[in-house]
Image (spheres, rainbow, N blue to C red):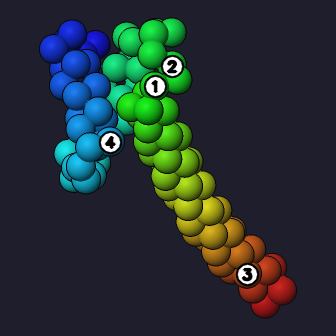
């Protein structure tokens, strides 16, 4: 669980983002920290600009994580298909030789 001080640092980073471009500072915040800060804020300030920005960043990071998982799963399926094909070809060669 993140500390109360860290939550306010994250909030401040998103509030500063509205005034100037501090995208590097925002990108340095992990998805888990963002989720915890959002959870700690609760229902407070849901429609403020920084909160909307924070939620958009969470959604973006979740989408990146989802795509990464799908990519790994697709690669694993290709590898397993290749191995299965080689095993079947080897077994067929042994059986029909």
The residue that mark 1 highlights is 48
Q: First in sequence: mark 4 or mark 2?
A: 4
Mark 3 or mark 2, earlier in chain: 2
- Residue marked by disc 3: 89
* Residue depth check, mark 4 versus mark 3: number of the one nearer the observer: 4
Residue at image x 44%, y 32%? Answer: 49
**Are there few (<14), some (14-19), or many (20+) residues within 10 Å of tag 3?**
few
Q: Are marks 3 and 2 in contact (CB under 8 Å)?
A: no
The answer to whether 3 is drawn above or below residue 23 in the figure is: above
Q: Residues within 10 Å of mark 4 (few under 14, many from 20)?
A: few
Disc nearest the viewer among 4 and 2:
4
At label 1, counting other C-alpha atoms closer than 10 Å, the crowd grade (few under 14, some 14-19, many 20 or more) is few
- Residues at discs 4 and 3 in contact (Cβ within 8 Å): no
Which residue of the protein is positioned furthest toward the bottom in this rendering? 97
From the image, state whether disc 3 or disc 1 is nearer to you: 1
**Is 88 situated above or below 17?**
below
Tell me where residue 43 appears, x and y as whole percent.
51, 9
Q: Is residue 80 left or right of residue 12?
A: right
State the image quarter where residue 12 is shown: top left
| Percent of width and height locating residue 41 | 39, 12
Q: Nearer the viewer, mark 3 or mark 2?
A: 2
Which residue has dot 4 on it? 18
Q: Which mark is residue 70?
A: none
Closer to the N terminus: mark 3 or mark 1? Answer: 1
Q: Which residue is mark 2?
A: 46
Q: Does dot 4 land on a helix, a strand or a loop?
A: helix
Q: Residue at x 78, y 90 (%)?
A: 97
Q: Are marks 1 and 2 in contact (CB under 8 Å)?
A: yes
Query: Which comes before the other along the chain, label 4 or label 1?
Result: 4
């Amino acid at each position: 669980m993140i500390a109360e001080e860290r939550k306010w640092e994250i909030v401040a980073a998103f509030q500063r983002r509205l005034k100037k471009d501090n995208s590097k500072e925002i990108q340095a915040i992990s998805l888990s920290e963002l989720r915890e800060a959002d959870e700690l804020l609760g229902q407070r300030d849901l429609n403020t600009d920084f909160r909307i920005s924070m939620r958009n960043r969470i959604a973006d990071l979740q989408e990146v994580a989802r795509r990464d998982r799908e990519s790994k799963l697709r690669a694993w399926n290709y590898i397993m298909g290749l191995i299965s094909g080689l095993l079947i070809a080897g077994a067929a060669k042994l059986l029909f030789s």
